[in-house]
Amino acid sequence: MASLVQPVRPNVATANIQLPGVESYEQVDREIAGTLVPTRGWFLLLGVSILLFLWGAGTWVYQIYWGLGNAGYNPPVMWGVYIITFVFWVGIGHAGTLISAILYLFRAGFRTTIYRCAEAMTVFAVMTAGLFPIIHIGRPWKFFWLVPYPNWRLIWPNFKSPLVWDVFAISTYLTVSATFLYVGLIPDLAVLRDRATNPFKKRLLAVMSLGWRNSEPEWRHFARMYLFLAAFSTPLVLSVHSVVSFDFAMALTPGWHATIFPPYFVAGAIFSGIGMVFTIIIPIRKFFRLQHIVTINHLDAAAKLALFTSMVVGCAYLIEFWVAWYSANEFEQAYFWNRVFGQWWWAAWIMLTCNMIFPLSLFSQKLRRNPTWLFILSILINIGMWYERFVIIVPSLSHEFEPWQWSGYLPSWVDVSILAGSFGWFFMWFLLFIKNLPVIAIAEVKEIVPPRLRSHQVPTGVDVAGHHLDYSPETPGERD
Amino acid sequence: MSRRRSWALASGFFAIAVAALGLSAYSGASSSQGFAPEQPVNFPHPRHVKQLGMNCLYCHYAANKSPDPGLPAVGTCMGCHSLVAGPRQPIEGVADRDTAAITQLYRYVATFDSSGRRGAIKPADQWSAIPWVRIHKVPEYVHFPHMRHVNAGVTCQTCHGPVPEMQRVYQYSSLNMGWCVNCHVQGYKLADGLLAAGDTAGARAAANVEPKKARYDCAVCHY
Amino acid sequence: MSQPPKTAVKRRDFLKVLGSTGAAATAVGCSQERVEQLIPYLVSPDHTVPGVSTNYATVCRECAAACGVIAEVRDGRAIKLEGNPDHPVNHGALCAKGQSALQGLYNPDRYRGPMIRQGDALAPATWEAALTLVRQRLDEARAANGGGGVRFVSQHENGSFGAFVDQWMSAGGFGAHVAYDPEADLAARAANQAEYGTPWPALDFSAARLIVSIGADFLDGWGASVAHQLSFADARAKLGDAPRFVYVGARRSLTGLNADEWLACRPGSELAIANALLAAVGGAGGGTIAEAAAASGVSEASLQRLADELRAATPSLVLGGVKTPDAHLVAQAAARINRAAGNVGVTIKPDAGLAGIGGAVGAQAMAALATEMNADAVRVLFVRGANPVHSVPKAALFAEGMAKVPFKVSFSSYPDETSELCDVVLPDHHGLESWGDSEPVRGTLGLQQPVMDPVFNTRSTGDVLLDLARSNGAMASRMPWATYRDFIMSRYPTGRGAFTEALAKGLGQGSSLARTVATPTLASTATAIAGDGEFFLVVHPSPALGAGAGANKPWLQELPDPVSKIAWQSWVEIHPSTAARLGIAPGDHVTVTTAAGSVTAPAYLYLGIQPETVAVALGQGHAAYGRYAQGIGVNAVDALGAAYDGGGALALSQAKAQVAKAAGHSRLVTVEGSARQHGRGIARALTAAQLAAGETGEAHHEFIGDASHEFLPGLRAPVANDAQGDMGSQGSNDKGMYAPDHWSGMASRRWAMTIDLARCTGCSACVTACYAENNIPTVGARWQGRSLRPFHTADGAGWDTTPGANILKGREMAWLRIERYFEGGEDGASDFETRFLPMLCQHCGNAPCESVCPVFATYHAPDGLNVQVYNRCVGTRYCSNGCPYKVRYFNWHGYGEVDRRQYAFPEPLHLQLNPDVTVRGKGVMEKCSFCVQRIRDAENVAKLENREVQPDEFTTACAQACPSRAITFGDAANEAWSVARQVDDPRAYHVFEELNTFTAVVYLQKVNHPAGGTR
Amino acid sequence: MTRGLIAAYHELDALVEGIEALQHRKFTKFTVYTPTPRHEIEHAIKPPTSKIRLFTLIGGLCGVTFGYWIAIWTSDYWPLVVGGKAIASWIPYTIIGFEVMVLVGALSTVYGMFILSRVPKITQTMGFDPRFTGGHYGIYVETSPERLKEAEATLRESGAVEVTNER
C-alpha cells in the first residue's frame, strides 16, 4: 500500500490539513487546557463586555417603560436597528453551523480546529439574536403569545405568519446548536475533569461531562449521533435563514418581495459568520499561542470560503438589480434606484464595497495567509453585513408604494445603546466560554494527531474522503 | 440508585415540568374569581331578593336596555328605606332586620349626632354617594353588552352565580376569555340558566330548547 | 405638562355624572387587579340610561355661522359633536373647528374658577369675592362719569346675546358694546349689504356653470364654509355638467386648490381684474383687460379667455373675497358682475342668506378702542371671548391701552393674551354648557342648550351680568330676568312652551333679531399696498386655527394644514423659483420684514403662490393660550400695520415686504412624504371630455406577470368567497362563521366605503371626526417628544420638546389622512392640479397585513372588516410593513397612559374619550376600524328592537362629518345600501388594484374641467 | 461474581493487538477506552451499527407529525381567515413541520445516545482510569475470578503499560 500522504503545500486543498507542530495527545491536552487560565487582559475585556451589556440592558428597561418611540423609528420604517441586528446575529450564527455540521459532512479537515469556536459563536450569536425580536416588539412582556401553548383564551398563534416560523426556526436552531455544542464538549469536559485538581471544579465537571469515560461504545454512539446531528443541522441552518428571509420576502414591500431571498440570505449569513469567525479566531490563536494548532492553512482555507460566499452574495446583489429592471415593475425599479443612487446611496455603497469589493482581495494567496489583513477584512465584512441588512430593511420601508408616506430614518441613542449592549452580551458569554471551556475541540484535534505507536512515528491525517490515513503499511485490524 | 433509574428519573422530571407548564397556563391564573370585597354598605341580597322577592332589574335597572347594567341610585334605596328604617318601623313578615346594614346606608343620607344617634334624613341634594367596590369587571378592551345577554334570556345567575344566596357578593365566574367563548360557541342552554336561577319547573320545561349560540368573531367584543 | 387626573370623583351637585360605566380608561394593560369603585347616582336622572347616549341639539359657537350640532352625551359627558341634519346651514355636516369645540369644553387649561389679580398674577378666588369687586368698581365708574367709561368687547355673535349686552350696557348707562370678530369678512359683508341688502346671501354653486373666485376662500373660512362646501360639492358631483371653477388670487388656498384653473395675480391687483371682468359682462364702471394684465402679472390671453368664458357661461357665480385694503371694492365689483351677468336670484340668493352673522366689528374698531384707552377715557373694560391683544396689530397699541384702564374684566374661559392683562376673570361657561340662540338663516332660530353640567366652576356670562344688574335698582328693573335662559325664552317668538318643544330639535321658527342693519356706504377708495421690498406679504387665516382661537385645541394643532400639510408650526410660503433665486431651501428660516415689523419662520416651498409673494398663516405665535398653543410658531399679525379694509377688518394683504434668509433651519413638521404620485395612479382624475366619451381615465397599471383580474364590480361577494374563492380550498376546512350559510349571517355582509374624489375638497373635517370618534391621541405637543439622551433632569431636559417632534418622525396617528398630490406644474410656471385623497385602512379582502401577524391580532372578520384586536397585539409592526397603503399606526409612547410624559389626554380632556372605543396602550398597532363600534351599536339597537339593521341606518364618523358628502359607507353586499349602488359607478377604482388586495374602499375618480374643455 | 482488570496502553498498535488477543482468547466482556475515536479500534472490535438511527427516525417522524398537527388543528379550532388564505393551509405549515421534525429528531438522537451510552452516569470510578481521557488507551476486562490471571497475561503480552485489578 503506497503512501497516500502528500507533502504539505501551502495552498493545498483544504481537506487535508495537518498539524506538524503537534506531536502527542498529552501535548494537545496540555496546551488547550493551558489556555483556561484567566489573565488580566481577559478580565479587562470581560469587564468591558459586562459594562456594555449592562448599559444595553438598562436602556432596554428604559425603553420598555417609556415606549419604543425613544428608538429611532420613523414610520413607515417600522423595523429598524433591532431587526437589522437580529438578522445580523442570526447570520453570524450560521457560519458556526456551517463549519461544525456542513463541513463535517463534507469531510473538510480544516474545520477541526476552528469548529468549537465557531459553534460556540453560533450559540451565543443566536442567543443574542433571539433577544432582538423581543426587544423590538411593542409589548415585550407578551412575547410568549407567539409560542403555541394551551391557554384559557382558547387562542393560538397564527402559523401562517413568518414570525411564528421564526419562533420555531430560531428556537429549534438555538436548541439544536446548543445541544450540538454541548454534546461535542462532553468528551472534552471529561478530559478537563480528569485533569482538574480543584475538587469543586472536578465535581462540577463530573456532572457536566455526565460521567463520560471515553469508552468505545460511547464513542460509537457518539459518532453516530454526531453524524445525525450534523445531518439535521445542515438543512436546519439553511432553513433558518430562509425563514428569516421570509420575514421580508412574504411582505409585498418592494425590495423585499423576491424569491431570491432565501439563498441570498443564507449565503450572506455564512459570509458574515465567517467574517466573525476570523474576528474571534485570529486574536484567540495569537493570544492563546495556538498558531500551530489553528494554522495559517486553516485560515487560508476559511478565507477561500469567505471569498466564495462573498461572490455568491455579490451575485445576489446584482441579480436583484437585474430582476428589478427586468420585472418592469415601477415600484421595484424606483426602490432600487433610490437604494443606490437616491436617499440611501451611502448605506448601499458601504454594503457593496465591504461585501463585494474588499473580499476580492482574497484572490491573493498572500493576503489570504496574512492574519492581520484577514482580521481587518473581517471587521469590514461585519460592518458591511450589518449594513446589508440595513439596506434591505430601511430603504425598502422608507420608499414603498405610497409616495405620500415616504420617509427617512435615523437611529437614536437607544438603538445604538442596545446594539452595543448586544455586542457586550455576546462577548461576555464568549469570553466566559473561552476561559472556562476548551476553545479547541480536544478530542477532535487528537483525531488528526498521529497516535503513538510501538514501532515508529509516521505522519498521519485524514484523506479527502475523510478516512484516517494509514500510519503503517501493516495497519492492525486490517490484516484479515 | 442504579444508572438506568437515574436517567429515567431525569426524563420523568422533564416530562412533569412540561406538563406543569401547560396546566398552569390553562388554569386561568390571572382570574380574580372568588373576589369578595367588603362593601361600604353590607347590602344583603338574600333579604331583598330571596325573602322580599325583588327583581334584579329593580335596582340594576338598565341591564335589559344598556350595555351597562345600571347601579341603583341612592334614591332607589331611599325609596323604601325612608320607611323601612332600622329598628323603628317593623316590616311585616321580616323579623330579623339587619339594622347594622341600614345604619351603614344612613351614614350617606342622614345626620348623626356626636353620640352616633341618627337624626333626620337629609334632603336629596345633600346625600353622598356610596362608593361600592366593583367586583365583576371585564377589561376595558372587552365590550360586554348586558342587554344582548339579558334579552337573549340568559339569567343573571348564569354568570353572576347565586347572588340571592350571597350574604357578601363575590365574583362567581372566572370571566376569562375562554369562559366567554365556550358559552358563545357551545351555546347557552336555557334549562341550565333557569336551574341556576332556581326555576326547576321552568328548567324541566325548557329541557329541549336548542342551545342559543352567539358569534365568536373577535371584533364582536374587542374593538 | 399634564397633571395627573384626580382620583376622587368630584361631586358638586347631585345630578353630576358617572353612572357605573367607568371612563374608557387605558386598556391593554394588566389592570384587572386594581380595586375600582362604582359611584352610583344619588337620584336617577330621568330619561337617561347609563351606558346609553343621549343626544342634545344645540348650536356650535366656534364661528359666526352658528351651525346646528347634535351633542352625544354619555353618562353626563359630551363625547362627540355631529352636525344637526335638520339645520338649514350645515345639514348634518360639521367642520373640524366645530368638532373641536369639545376640546375647548374639556380644555385642560381652562380657568377652573374666577380669578382676581394679586400683584403680577391672577389668583383663584370665589365668585362672591370676584363679583363684589366688579360690582364695586362698576359703581365707582358709574359714580365717576355716569358709567360712560365702561366698554364691553364681545366675540362674534349670532343671536340674542348682542342685544342682551346692549341692553345691559344701556341699562347701566355704560358705553357701547362691540362684537369683535377678527375672522369676519367684514368687507364682503359690507359690500353684500350694500349690493344685495343682506350680509351674506346664499350661494348656489350647483346652479352655476362657471365659478370665479377672486380671493374668496369659500371652503376655508370665507363666510359659512360648511354651507358653501355642501353646495360646492353638489355642484362638482354633477361631474360632466359641473361648473368650471377659476380661482384668481395671489395664493392658492384650499379653495384655490379645488379650482380647475388658477390665475396667479399680484396681491392688490384683484380689483383691476374684477373691473375687467365687470366690463366683459357689460357692467358699468369696469376696466380693461390690458390694465388688469399689467397690474396683476396675469397674461392678457388668460384674462381674455376668462372674460369670454364668463360672458358665455350663464348663470355664473363670481365671488370677491380678498383681504386687501380695497377688499370691499373687489367684493362690490364681484357683486356687480353677478348683477350684470344675471346671477342674482339664480346662483346668488339674497333672500336665503345667513341672517345672523351681521353686527361684528373688526380690528379698526379695536384700534379705536385702544385710542380711547390710551386717552384714559375707559375706566372699566369687559372682554368676552375675543382676544384683541393677539389679533390687533401692535401699531394700534391695544395692550398699552389696556394697561391704562384701571379695571379690566375678562369673561374668557381660557387664559389668553388679553385675559392675562385683566384684573378679574369671570370664566364663562363653554358654549356646550350654556343657553343661547342664533338665527342662522332668516326665519329659523337655532337653540343652544347646555348638554351637560359645567366641567369647572364657571358661570354663564349672561347670568353674571344679570347678577351684577340685580345690585343696582335701575339696572335691575331693565334686566328683569332671573337667568339668561329666561331672557332667551322670553325672546322666543312663540312662547315658552314652544321653546321647550323646539329644544328637542334645536331649531325653531321665527325671528328674534330685532336688529336692522343700515346699508353701509362703502369708501370708494382704499390705501394701496405699499412699503419697501420686492415681495408682497399675504397673511391669511389658518383653515383650522382661524385667527388663533383654535390654537389651544390639540386636534386642530395636529390637523395638517390642508394646503401645506404642516402642523404645530408656522411657515412662510415661498414660490420654488423665488426660493431658488434667494438660495432658500425648505425649512430654512426666512425673515419677512414690513414697515410694521417682521416675522421669522421656516420656509415652505409652494407652487401655489405667486412668485412675487410670500404668505404666512395666522393662528400661531401665542404668548399665553394654554399648553397646546404657547411657544408654537409666530404671530403673523406682528408684520402687519394698522391698515383696514372698507369693512373695518384688518387688511391682511396690506404691505410689501423684504424677504431674507435668516440664520437657522427647522425641519417642517409636515405629514407629506412626496407631493407627487410618481405616476402610480393613486389619486386619479379624468376630464369631463373623457367622462363624456365613456373613457375610464388614467389606465390602471398592468404589470408584466401580474395576476390578471377584473375589477370587482360592486364587491358583491361576501368576504369568505372573496378570500377563499380562487385561492383557498372550498371543501377542506371548517369555515365557521365565514361560511355564507352560517347561522350568524356575518359572512353575508361586506362593509365597504366609497369616496367620491369629485366631491372631496380636502377640508379634513373627516380627520378630526375620526380623532374624536376613535380616541386617537394627538402626539405633537411639546411634552410628547422622545428622549434625546440617557439622563433627564426633572425639568424635562433631554426630551425632544420641539412642537410636533413626533410628526417630524412620521409618528402622527391619524387613522384617516388626506393625501394632497400635485399634478403638473413641475416647471414652476405652468398651472398645476391638486388631488386630495382621503386614505384610510382599505379593509382588503386579501389583506397583506393579516397573514403576517403572528398572534391573529389582525385578521379578517366574516363581515369584511379587517379587524385590529388591540389587546391581542404584541407590537411586531409586521402588519405595517405588509400594508401597501401605510395606514397602520403604532403607539410609540404611552399616549393613553396617565403616568407617562406623553399622555395625550390630560385631565379633563379624557372625559371626551369615547367609551365605546378602547384607548390604546403603548406598544400596540391601531388603524381605521370602519367605526366597528358603530356597527356593533347598530346591531345591538336593531336586536333590541327586534329587527334587522336597516340600509343606511348608520354611517362612520368620517362620512357623517364630511361637509362634501364624499364618503359613503355601508354593506356592499346588499343592493339596498347606497354604497352598493355607488361602487358600480364607471369612475370607480381601487388604489393599487394590481396588488390583488381586493380593497373594500372604492374611490370614484375626480372630474376635471380644463380650460377649453367641453361644456 | 465477576472481577475486572484495567489495562492502560500507551500505543495504539499495542491496544489493537490487545483487543485482538482478548477476542482470540474468547474474552467477551471488555470495554475499550480511547482518547479519540480511531478506526483501527473499530475495525478490531467490529461492533454492531449503533441503534441511534432508530431514535432519530422515530423522533423525526413524531416531530413532523406534531408540527403539522398543531398547525392544522389550531387553525381549525378557531377558524380565522387571514389575507384570504385557506384556513388550514399546508404549504406554510410545512415550515412548522420541518422545524419541529429537526427539533424533536435532534433531541431524540441525543436522548438515544444517552440511553445507548448509559450517560449520564452517576459513578464513573469502576473500570475506568483518568488517563484514558488523556494520552492513554485502555481496556477494562470483566471475567470470572478463575480466568483473571490469563487475562492479565494476555494484556501484558500485548503491551499494556499497566494492568490493575479492579475491586
Image (tube, grey):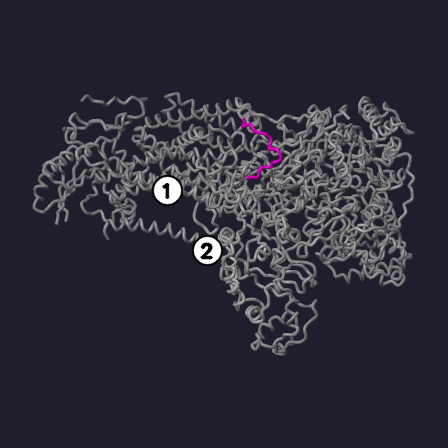
Instruction: Identify which residue, A466 or A327, lies in the foreground.
Output: A327
Residue A316: numbered disc: none
Q: Is residue C907 left or right of residue C875?
A: right
Q: Is residue C635 left or right of residue A328?
A: right
The amino acid type, in three-letter code, at marker 1 is Leu
Instruction: Identify which residue, C7 or A298, lies in the foreground.
Output: C7
Instruction: Identify which residue, A114 or C759, lies in the foreground.
Output: C759
Q: In x, y percent, where is residue C819?
A: 66, 35
Residue numbers of the magenta segment: C706-719
Tags 2 and 1 both on a single chain: no
Residue A432: numbered disc: 1
Q: Secondary structure at mark 2?
A: loop
Q: Quadrant of residue C453?
A: bottom right
Count the marks: how many?
2
Residue under pointer 2: B29
| Disc 2 + disc 1, Cβ < 8 Å | no
Residue C987 highlighted magenta (yes or no)? no
Q: In x, y percent, where is residue C927?
A: 59, 42
Q: In x, y percent, where is residue C1014?
A: 76, 24
Front of the two marks 2 and 1 = 2
Instruction: Identify which residue, C169 or B183, lies in the foreground.
Output: B183
Mark 1 neighbour density, 10 Å: few (under 14) some (14–19) many (20 or more): some
Q: In x, y percent, where is residue D18?
A: 13, 36
Residue D21 higher or lower than D167, as above or below: above
Q: Is residue A456 left or right of residue A29?
A: left
From the image, which quarter does the N terminus of chain A lie in? Answer: top left
Mark 2 neighbour density, 10 Å: few (under 14) some (14–19) many (20 or more): few
Residue C832 higher or lower than C487, as above or below: above
From the image, which quarter does the C terminus of chain A lie in? Answer: top left
Q: Chain of mark 1?
A: A
